[in-house]
Image: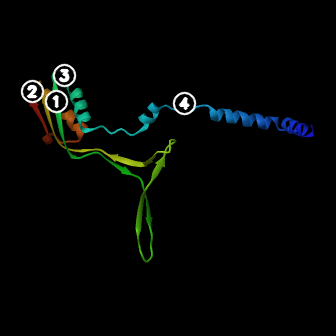
Amino acid sequence: MELTEKIMGWVRKYRFVLLVLLVGIALMLIPYGRTEETEASTAPQTPTQPDISRELSQILSQIDGAGEVSVMLTVRTGTSTVYQTDDTLTTGDSGSERKDTVIVTDENRGQTGLVQHIVYPEYRGAIIVCQGADNVQVRLSIMEAVARITGLGMDKISVLKMK
């Protein structure tokens, strides 16, 4: 009897602390609400070469008078990812240098490298085949659009008539 009275007195004295503690535990048990879709959308997406050619074909076909368009891009260098590193330079007898990639751990304990930046492809040339290539204005519009998207000079872009 004496023990239960001591416990009840302690509960009455610290009832607000216990209430806050129970609410905190209840809040931690509620699911967070993140879905797999949101996790997948946060991953960096780099478009592949066929995707870029397809998108460029769709955009160029919307130019007045262009008609159906096919695009082929040649690539000098592909897409590459540069990861953040920690550099350690030790002076002394060995004079060694050490580079470690910075690793990030997500909430599911998956580990990935910390991306510093992405180097996008460098293009060598472009061939565009379209129905409206016999019109000089259409040809010029297509060449200007491709030059702005790819960074190529006009001498590296060929616009040809589709049969």
First of labels 1, 3 by sequence position: 3
Q: Quadrant of the C terminus?
A: top left
Q: Are marks 2 and 3 in contact (CB under 8 Å)?
A: no
Mark whose residue sits in front, 4 or 3:
4
In terms of secondary structure, where does tag 4 sit?
loop
- Residue at 24% over, 27% down: 59
Q: Are marks 2 and 1 in contact (CB under 8 Å)?
A: yes
Mark 4: give few (<14), some (14-19) or many (20+) Cα within 10 Å: few
Q: Is residue 23 left or right of residue 4?
A: left
- Alpha-carbon span between mark 4 and mark 3: 47 Å
Q: Nearer the viewer, residue 112 or 140?
A: 112
Q: Is residue 58 left or right of residue 28?
A: left
First of labels 2, 1 by sequence position: 1
Mark drawn on residue 162: 2
- x and y, in percent, of residue 89 in the image: 43, 67
What residue would you read off at disc 1? 70
- Alpha-carbon span between mark 2 and mark 4: 52 Å
What's the image's color scheme? rainbow
- Residue at 65% over, 33% down: 27
- x and y, in percent, of residue 84 in the image: 41, 53
Mark 3: give few (<14), some (14-19) or many (20+) Cα within 10 Å: few
What residue would you read off at disc 4? 33
In terms of secondary structure, where does tag 2 sit?
loop
- Alpha-carbon span between mark 2 and mark 3: 16 Å
Mark whose residue sits in front, 1 or 3:
1
Q: Nearer the viewer, residue 87 or 136?
A: 87
- x and y, in percent, of residue 120 in the image: 29, 44
